[in-house]
Image (tube, coloured by chain):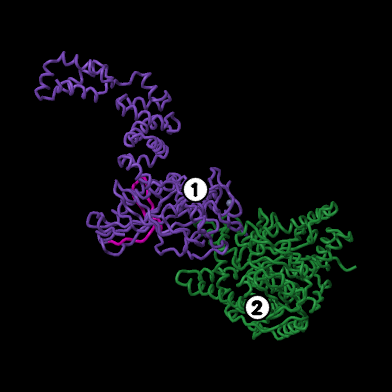
Chain colours: A green, B purple
Amino acid sequence: MADLADLTIAEAGRGLRAGDFTAVDLLDAVTKRATMTEAQLHAYLTLDSGGARAAAEKADADLASGDDHGPLHGIPVALKDNMVTKGVETTASSQILAGWKPPYDGTAVARLKAAGAVITGKTNLDEFAMGSSTENSAFGPSRNPWDHTRVPGGSSGGSAATVSVGSAFGSFGSDTGGSIRQPAALCGVVGMKPTYGMVSRYGLIAFASSLDQIGPFSRTVEDSALLLDAVAGWDRMDSTSIDGDVPAFSGSLSKGVEGLRIGLVTELMGEGIDPQVKAAVTAMADKLAGAGAEVIEVGLPASEYALSAYYLIAPAEASANLARFDGVRYGHRTEHLEGTTEDMMAMSRAEGFGPEVIRRILLGTYALSAGYYDAFYGQAQRVRTLMRNDFASAYEQVDVLISPTSPTTAFPVGERAADPIAMYYSDVCTIPSNLAGDPAISVPVGLDDQRLPIGFQIMAPALGEEVMYQVAAEVERLAGFTDRAPLATSEVVHP
Amino acid sequence: MSIDSVTPLNAGGWEAVIGLETHVELSTASKMFCGCRADIPEEPNTACCPVCLALPGALPVPNEQAIEGIVRIGTALGCEINETSLFYRKNYFYPDLPKNYQISQYTFPVAEHGALEIDVEGEPFTVGITRVHMEEDTGKSTHVGDGGGRIHDASHTLLDFNRAGVPLVEIVTEPDIRTPEQARAYGAELQRVVLALGVSDAKLEAGSMRFDANVSVRRPGEEFGTRTETKNVNSLRSLQRAVAFEIERQIAVLESGGTIVQETRHWNEDTGKTSSMRTKEESEDYRYFQDPDLLPLSVDETWRLRAVEALPELPGAARTRFRDAGVDPVNAETLLDNPALAALFTDAVAAGAPGRLVANWLTGEVIAQLRRDEVDVSDTSLSSSHLVELASMVDGGDLSSSAAKDVLTRAMAGEGTPRAIAEANDLLQVSDTGAIEEVVEQVLVDNPDALEKVRSGDMKPLGFLTGQVMRQMGGKADPKVVQQVLRAKTQGE
Ligand SMILES: [Zn+2]
């Protein structure tokens, strides 16, 4: 029998209920896998062995007594370390929060626990989710499971890597400009950003509130839907969460694409997209046409300005969101206490934040300043409106839009670290959906000539998760992508 | 509005221009954006949660009761209630501001463009209301050390976040106010409005209602002068004094050739002076932007109409009603400030008692007695039916006005109904003409000289004769009836 750590969530669920193995066995399998891979990958910041074991034992006891919490019952799931977990250190990969143990669970975390999931631990990210490579972590970068000299993408690089190597069955990240989909693409797994408001942000450490959305990483499209089902739905603690019934997304995955209209986004297939990535996307578009979909080219003209607008809106919101980290109530406080309280706050922040976070706070503060607001923040909001209008007219012609997820496959560690603009360009294909608040998913469709995964993005209108999953399931089937990241056990460095 | 005709000028021909910003803490059950109790318990940091402490990941959810409260205030101030209003983040760093931004409003506040009619020593005056917006309160800093609570000399600062996030309504006036007296009258009237609505306890001394005064001076007809903002005004009297001080100070500065610096000033109650609070002169940039955590707030037509229908009688209307009932202006203001007495007044007048007399009793003997005993009127036995009965006894001549005051005090003490008290204490006066006539005839017989003088047209002895009758009747005759009878007997024969 295959290693339990390589099962999908759906398979693991069936085995658990058939009595083939226990939740503790599943946890042991992913823990073993983590032990095997963490030295190279550094996907986890915190492994909550005690909490996870207790949860797994409870899951087994519950199941034995007939108390089945559903598809995630007993399934080991990892969480990005910007999701607040009661009693378990939560840092957002920032020195300013090192050692902080929250007194509460975020809504998504609480729902996962209620669904019987076993929380394995907290995964690495770019500090406060600001980055596209997981190199901006105060606690050291994560590495790509397919090539340890390369980045796993970001900012949810740790969550992508755990699912890729099997140190978790599924995981959650947050996507502000592509932070779930881009690392999913670079790590060869499925990563999905729901409609804005589909998943409560209560307990997600805010980066850019109007863009942030929690979503799942998984090895299959079906698992993605199962994970989303557990956390989706209105929450009274988040005013921006959507009030309304949420269908079970795992219900409609096998409908095919016959008769669907699919738009390949012209602007996201231009210069700057790696030829191999472009070829893989075109090939998949042809396969979809072969499977009965009507595939046409569709324009999103405003996407040309989306990146610039995003890098004003997100830092502007971040500049206020991160103001609370001041050393007064929690987190890092400077030891230099000779000046005023104001000096203490300024010094704590200067010491606690990393350079990319400081860069974005400065940028955002500037964009909101009197005299500049209209030229920067105001203008960016107008682009956002244009972007929404573009999507609206596109969706008059087609049911979903497709594009590459990332312009390139995984890039070498350090390559873009000194060039913020090149790094920012990593999100060029994913940002439009964040600006519009629409759902989008990345599905792996193949490998490039360096055996690095290529991600294929499917975008749908707001609340269009069902049709998005419907197409994603077909893409998964047509791609037949079954490769797994190599488990380079021989490379384990024993201390 | 036309103010030029009535603009009062200060010495040297200077005109003051005053605008007030008033913060009112709403007495809701919970805070503005979380479920914590909003009544600010004594024990520090006992009414706090992830939201009002701004823990990472926490999000605000608006309190509907608070929105209801501000809609009521806006409606009472005659404002337009915006169908859609927006929450903004006002960014500034301060240790008692947990998020280091305050959720407030900027464009599209809940209410704007209203007015409050005030009464300045009997003269009506209208103050324009620019806007009424919703925000949240901060925590409280206590600076500990040798500096007597001053931040620069403190060794450390204690923070209490119980108040952080308590719903706060800010009411901003147009720069319509011209005198310290008007400023005070506006403050008093606004406090009455808020109390009438029951949305806040509006206690100035406790800080649940507080004023910031924007003051400048100019020559009439000129552009506005540079203004200062005075904070820490904790009573209506302080408001008047602080504004008066600031006007005089600015005039003195300008007349000695100086210029006014735009700054925030601190009112010191003990010295009776304002002093500069901030050394930084550049205006603060709050980098307002719409709060992405909060959806636009919609107050629909139904809600707006409900607020109008639910309005209680406002102080302006009550003032008019009191005056129409014959109450003099000073007593009318006293009734406005004493809702329990005003309620007795209203009930008594509705039952037919004369307004002026009842108001005189309530604002005279009754208040004096309450102050003496340090109690509220509800602690006494006084009821509106007592007032009605007392008034009818006086009107019917059964009780002299001085005896009525005695009966009133006894009724408050629970000695019974006015008639029972008057009977028990032998205070009823005789207005039975027959009994009085007998005594009058006897007195005339006993005083032939006086009678003769009156008959010959000298009315002076009438007073003496009245006194004689009253004395013989033990003071219990109605003096009006005695005089009538005396006149009839002396003229008629
Ligand atoms: Zn609270």
Task: Look at the image and give the residue range highlighted in magenta.
Answer: B258-278
- Residue farthest toward the right in the current orientation of the protein: A1
Query: Could you tell me which residue is drawn at 34 percent across and 48 percent down?
Result: B185
Q: Amino acid at mark 1?
A: Val
Viewer-nearest residue: B22 or B216:
B22
Query: Could you tell me which residue is drawn at 49 percent across and 49 percent down?
Result: B26
Q: Is residue B267 magenta?
A: yes
Residue B290 placement (x, y as % from top left): 52, 65
Q: Is residue A400 magenta?
A: no
In this rendering, the answer to whether A232 lies above or below B203 is below
Q: Any mark on residue B248, and which?
A: none
Chain identifier of the residue bearing label 2 in the image: A
- Residue farthest toward the front in the current orientation of the protein: B493
Q: Amino acid at mark 2?
A: Cys
Viewer-nearest residue: B60 or A153:
B60
* Res A56 quadrant in image: bottom right
Task: Point out the image quarter for the C terminus of chain A.
Answer: bottom right
Mark 2, residue position: A429
